[in-house]
Amino acid sequence: MTVSEYNEAVDLYSDRLYRFVLKTIKDMHKAEDIVQDSYEKLWKNVESVDATKVKSYLFTTAYHTLIDRIRKEKRSVFSEEMNLQEKSHENNYSDLKEILQEAVNRLPEMQRMVLLLRDYEGYSYKEIGEMAHLNESQVKVYIYRARVFLKSYIGKMETVL
């Protein structure tokens, strides 16, 4: 991969990569950091990365960095939450978008990732499988389970409203 191909990759994929990470992590600064880390890793391996596979490389790198950060944060948040009592309150939803976002947030990490890559970013099952190191059947199963959960969750919320 040449420097000009690297620059072209920045132009072509940085916005999509940022949107993907932001959808999952919901923190602009952390999303920017993850995207920057992904491009930094690409730069360090610029000579060994094939220019035709740069998109997959970037999304795979961002995905793994994202998972690492989420796991790290969960460990620290879990230790902080052990000392706090949770207060329960009822959420009153008036917007389907809010309900859907709440449901997506409740999905397990892997299901959320593959669902976002498929439905929000438009990647094929094969591309998602390459990024997440899954086969196409596993990707389809995760997406199916995520959609079933979303349908069930939204159905429950509509009966509450």
Image (tube, grey):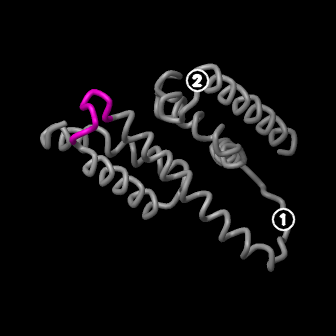
Residue in the foreground of this view, choosing between 84 and 134: 134
Residue in the foreground of this view, choosing between 91 and 116: 116
Q: CA distance from mark 1 to mark 2?
A: 40 Å
Q: Is residue 96 left or right of residue 35?
A: right
Residue in the foreground of this view, choosing between 121 and 132: 132
Residue at 28% of width from left, 46% of height from top? 45
Which comes sooner in the sequence, label 1 or label 2? Answer: 1
- What residue does disc 2 label? 135
Of the residues tagged 1 and 2, which is closer to the observer? Answer: 2
- What residue does disc 1 label? 89
Q: Is residue 62 magenta?
A: no
Residue at 40% of width from left, 49% of height from top? 18
Residue in the foreground of this view, choosing between 114 and 60: 60
When the figure is inspected, residue 27 is found, relative to residue 76, above or below; the finding is above
x and y percentages locating residue 119 in the rendered image: 54, 30
Identify residue type, mark 2: Asn
x and y percentages locating residue 19 in the rendered image: 43, 46
